[in-house]
Image (cartoon, rainbow, N blue to C red):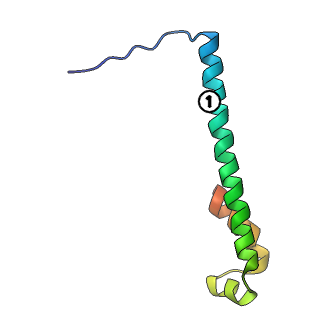
Amino acid sequence: MAVIRQEPNSLTFFSKVVQFSTTLYFSLSDRIKKRRTYLQTIRELEKMTDRDLADIGFSRSEIKARALKSIYKINI
């Protein structure tokens, strides 16, 4: 048995405002979480000694680039 769900063709103004604000809230929430994780990653890596960083395969100058790549999936 198939279930058919019909969406209204046009959303009311209030529905559009609610949809926009919900999308905005969740996108901002996601950006804040990623930023906090990025800053925490940088703080933790900066606490490490140069020798410890060399053991995991990169230098102190690569900390921010590695954090960006890890959190935001950005290749620099």
Give neighbour class at mark 1: few <14, some 14-19, many 20+ (Cα, 10 Å): few
Q: Quadrant of residue 7?
A: top left
Q: Position of residue 14 (x, y in %)?
A: 63, 13
- Residue at the image point whose x is 76% and y is 76% from the top: 46
Compare residues 73 and 20 and report the one nearer the observer: 20
Q: Quadrant of residue 53?
A: bottom right
Q: Position of residue 23 (x, y in %)?
A: 62, 31
Q: Which residue is mark 1?
A: 22
- Residue at the image point whose x is 66% and y is 53% from the top: 34
Image quadrant where one finds the N terminus: top left
- Residue at the image point whose x is 40% and y is 13% from the top: 6
Q: Quadrant of residue 25?
A: top right
Image quadrant where one finds the C terminus: bottom right
Compare residues 7 and 47 and report the one nearer the observer: 47
Rendered view: 62 above or below 73: below
Q: Position of residue 70 (x, y in %)?
A: 63, 63
Q: Position of 6 compared to 66: left or right?
A: left
Q: Secondary structure at mark 1?
A: helix
Total count of labels: 1
Compare residues 61 and 75 and report the one nearer the observer: 61
Rendered view: 55 above or below 7: below
Q: Position of residue 73 (x, y in %)?
A: 63, 57
Amino acid, disc 1: Thr
